[in-house]
Amino acid sequence: MKPTPTSSPRGFTFIELMASLTLGILVVGLAVKLFSQGVDATWVISQRAEMQQDLRAVQNILFKDISLAGAGLPVGQGVALASGTGTSPIYGCDQTGTAAGCPPNGGVNYPCAGGCPGVPTLYGVMPGFALGVIPPGSPVTTDLITVTYSDIIFALNCYNASITSGTQVTFTVQNPLSSSCVLPPGLNAPQNVNDPVVGLTPGDLVLFQGTTGVAPSTNTFYAVGEVTNVSGGNGAYAVTFGANDPLQMNQPGAANDLSAYVGGNNIVASRIFVITYYLKVQPDPINAGPGTPVLMRQVSGHTAVPVYENIVNMQYTYDTYNSSGTLLSNSPDGGESAGISLNLIQKINIEHLAMRSQLNGARSALYATSGYQGYDVQTSISARNLSYQNRYVVPPNQN
């Protein structure tokens, strides 16, 4: 017979089992927490990276337009617009002529030379201090900014322009092409005035330069009109600048209107872009709430298009010169309220260009109340086509 063992095998005691179970739960809980924090951190970083990329794209679009401000406009001066009828030309409206088509405060009046009331004047850059909206969650009213420059793609200056009446201008292609004709690379002839891609359409603005009188008593004039219709073909076109246009540019019989220069000589025309950036709060079609702020870009009298969502603040200041020639830094309205000409603006300062994340909070309860993430950038842009002058004079007979 085998001897009977004096001891028998046994399992864990209840205390040992509970201790090991507790330890295991703690380890698993810590691992889950670390994993959750890692996922949340990845979420936050990806949101910030996306915001940086989007904000960089917004900057590039703004920089391109602002840096061209004043290009192709008369050097060192603004362009007087039609006035004297009690109706002021406006910008920031489309062809619908409705309040919905004029979101920046129902259309913005052009600044006046020497202060309003006065002659409304088109400048290379026109500040819109506190003329925007108050985005959701922000206590600050945003700014608009409007820049003007000439179109170098559409060779309208390769046509002879003749102001035949107060509301119509005929364009005939130059033959031969004059020295004022500058064709884009790759073109041997100017595009048709009614070209469906680059030609004139209702809502376009055209700048005319010409002379009146007989030499030697001639005077140079500048005038701006809004296109309301285009007809013709085969090198000869009739473009209508009819009254009651949405931008109120065409005012037959008013001072500085096209009608004042019927029969003018040596007329050169070019299309100009009057580009306005502003914020608009887009209603949320699904969730009730304040909606999403969107940066909008409007060109002349055409329908505004969205540039980027979630831009929550946009504010500018301007460096300019006052009447005594002293540099005035960081003026929010470019010195307009002090009667300073907007032609003296030297630099545009973006004080705030702020973007928020697309989603509120992160993916777990750990960040559930963190709100939106945000970035705010500041930078400056020098528009060399404004009052830039070469201050380094080369002495005679030196290269």
Image (cartoon, rainbow, N blue to C red):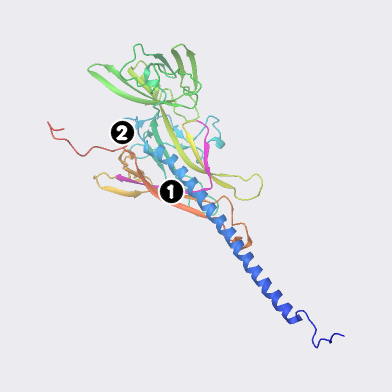
The part of the chain drawn in magenta is 302-320
Was residue 312 drawn as part of the magenta stretch in this picture?
A: yes
**Rendered view: 206 above or below 294:** above
Query: Residue 194 placed where, x, y %?
Result: 48, 18
Query: Residue 385 placed where, x, y %?
Result: 32, 35
Query: Residue 70 placed where, x, y %?
Result: 35, 34
Query: Badge 2 is on which residue?
Result: 77
Q: Residue furthest right?
A: 1
Closer to the eye: label 2 or 1: 1
Asked whether 10 or 194 is in front, the reply is 10
Chain-order first, disc 2 or disc 1:
2
Q: Residue at position x 24%, y 16% from top?
A: 215
Q: Residue furthest left?
A: 397
**Label 1: element kind:** strand
Q: Is residue 333 something that shows in the picture? A: yes
* Residue type pointed to by label 2: Gln
Residue 4, labelled with which disc? none
* Residue type pointed to by label 1: Gln
Query: Residue 173 placed where, x, y %?
Result: 39, 14
Is the stretch drawn in magenta largely helix, strand or loop? strand
Cα distance in 3D space between marks 2 and 1: 25 Å
**Label 2: element kind:** loop
Q: Position of 363 compared to 52: left or right?
A: right
Q: Are marks 2 and 1 in contact (CB under 8 Å)?
A: no
Splitting the image into 4 quarters, where does residue 261 fall?
top left
Q: Position of 313 compared to 39: left or right?
A: left
Q: Is residue 117 something that shows in the picture? A: no
Was residue 127 drawn as part of the magenta stretch in this picture?
A: no
Q: Position of 301 compared to 216: left or right?
A: right
Quadrant assignment for the C terminus: top left
Query: Badge 1 is on which residue?
Result: 315
